[in-house]
Image: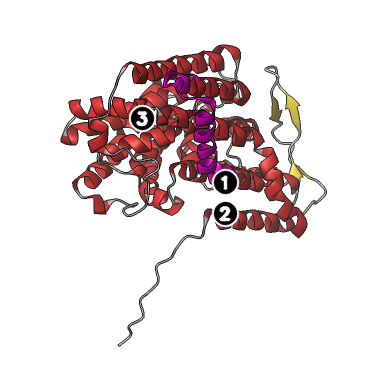
């Protein structure tokens, strides 16, 4: 009798996985021809690809030493995001330490009982989705991941539910964006269609996707609430983020805690105003988060040493997630150094000309989703793919509005699953192993992908 137990496949450590992808991309630079499109600055002042200008260039394969250096160069390339996450996470850590959210959750737990608590899931997904849909919030929401993880655990769910609220909120916000200037705004400008056109249909798309995602996430949350052993992260330690429901329900919610939440609310309004009106980015947003954290700490009566120690602890907690950002950017560094990104985009676009309109529109969705693995930047993907997809839509008889919709669907949602995009970063912040995140989110992603396919089919008939 064979007593040997079959070993379950175990995904390697995220650093190993990302390094392997870097190596694979480096090998690809030796196999694929180097090539580029000509680029020009359009009327809006954006540098875009000129369709039909793809040409090969001198090969520049990435060698072994350059592959190794790509990790460092990735850190440098992603420096703005890395330091924003460090500062914002530490600032939010101060706010969490005040206990203000414990008090807030106490109120929620007293009002919502049993399964009724699940209403918090679609509400927060909608709130985050609106922020992403309008002003392009994505990385800016990362500091709130620990908050939602703590709230979810306190409500009897698990860390994956908290992470799912943030990830699905911002991912679907980008996918169903009505006026996100970094994605749909740029894509419509490049496609030469009226800005803000198709808003009504995109609102419907966003609502439908939120409903599908919420139903699936709530179903998982209720399953965990009924039997904690059903959690995909059962047995994992989240003590540094968890809020004990017994302690939370009795947690004081006095004037200081309420003032801290008031500071946070004002800070969020300032962030929205700054991004929308002043065009703020990571440098300015880091300053706002830091101010919010320090004011909150002073309200609680903490001295400079206490504030510094709490921030130092947060820096330690978030270090691995910040390293993941650098490794992920290393992949992009290799692809750019080898000049094969345009080659891949060109190769993917060729088969689309062979399909009838209704198949071509669905194929665009698939292409944009896959392309986001290589170009996780929404604006970067817009300026690379839309100059090709827009005229391609004309050739196959599809509205350019549909091409833009396929772009934003493929760009937004896949950010939460691709290891080259935001998935490992968000998992690192939540303290969740990426394979366990995939176990929850991949079925949800596939259901949403099918939903997007149906919406694309409807759009093909409508526009």
Secondary structure, mark 3, is helix
Q: Which residue is mark 2?
A: 15
The location of residue 180, given as percent across then percent down, is 51, 22
- Among all residues in the image, which is located at the extreme right? 58
**Which numbered mark, 1 or 3, is in the foreground of this view?**
1
Q: Which residue is mark 1?
A: 324
The location of residue 27, given as percent across then percent down, is 69, 59
Q: Which residue is mark 3?
A: 125
Rounded to the nearest whole Å, what is the CA distance between mark 3 and mark 2?
29 Å
The location of residue 5, given as percent across then percent down, is 35, 76
Q: Residues within 10 Å of mark 2 (few under 14, many from 20)?
A: some
Q: Residue at x 57, y 58 (%)?
A: 16
- Who is closer to the viewer here, 155 or 135? 155
Q: Quadrant of residue 115?
A: top left
Q: Compared with residue 216, is residue 194 higher up or lower down, i.e. above or below? A: above
Instruction: Name the quadrant of the C terminus.
Output: top left
- Who is closer to the viewer here, 34 or 329? 329
């Amino acid at each position: 009798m064979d007593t040997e137990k079959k070993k379950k496949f175990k995904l390697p450590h995220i650093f190993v996985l990302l390094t392997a992808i870097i190596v694979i991309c480096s090998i690809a630079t030796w196999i694929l021809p180097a090539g580029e499109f000509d680029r020009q600055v359009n009327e809006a002042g954006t540098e875009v690809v000129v369709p039909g200008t793809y040409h090969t260039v001198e090969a520049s394969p990435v060698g072994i030493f350059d592959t190794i250096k790509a990790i460092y160069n990735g850190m440098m390339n992603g420096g703005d995001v890395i330091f924003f996450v460090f500062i914002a996470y530490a600032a939010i850590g101060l706010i969490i330490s005040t206990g203000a959210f414990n008090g807030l959750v106490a109120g929620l737990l007293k009002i919502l009982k049993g399964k009724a608590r699940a209403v918090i899931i679609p509400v927060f997904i909608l709130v985050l989705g609106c922020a992403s849909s309008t002003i392009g919030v994505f990385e800016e929401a990362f500091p709130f991941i620990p908050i939602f993880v703590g709230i979810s655990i306190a409500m009897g769910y698990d860390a994956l539910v908290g992470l799912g609220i943030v990830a699905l909120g911002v991912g679907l916000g980008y996918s169903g964006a009505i006026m996100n200037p970094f994605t749909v705004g740029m894509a419509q400008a490049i496609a030469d269609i009226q800005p803000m056109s198709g808003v009504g249909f995109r609102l419907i798309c966003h609502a439908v996707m939120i409903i599908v995602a919420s139903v699936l996430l709530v179903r998982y949350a209720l399953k965990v609430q009924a039997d904690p052993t059903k959690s995909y992260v059962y047995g994992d330690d989240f003590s540094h983020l968890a809020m004990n429901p017994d302690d939370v329900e009795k947690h004081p919610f006095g004037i200081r805690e309420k003032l801290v939440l008031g500071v946070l609310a004002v800070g969020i309004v300032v962030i929205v105003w700054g991004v929308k009106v002043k065009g703020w980015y990571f440098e300015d947003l880091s300053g706002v988060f830091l101010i919010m954290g320090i004011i909150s700490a002073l309200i609680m009566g903490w001295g400079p040493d206490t504030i510094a120690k709490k921030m130092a602890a947060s820096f330690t907690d978030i270090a691995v997630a910040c390293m993941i950002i650098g490794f992920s950017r290393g992949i992009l560094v290799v692809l750019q150094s080898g000049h094969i990104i345009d080659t891949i985009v060109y190769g993917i676009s060729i088969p689309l000309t062979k399909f009838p309109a209704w198949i071509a529109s669905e194929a665009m969705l698939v292409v944009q989703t896959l392309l986001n693995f290589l170009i996780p930047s929404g604006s970067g993907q817009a300026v690379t793919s839309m100059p090709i997809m827009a005229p391609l839509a004309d050739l196959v008889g599809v509205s350019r509005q549909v091409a833009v919709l396929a772009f934003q669907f493929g760009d937004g949602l896949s950010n939460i699953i691709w290891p080259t995009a935001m998935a490992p970063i968000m998992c690192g912040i939540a303290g969740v192993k990426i394979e366990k995140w995939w176990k929850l989110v991949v079925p949800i992603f596939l259901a949403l992908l099918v939903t997007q396919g149906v919406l694309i089919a409807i759009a093909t008939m409508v526009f």
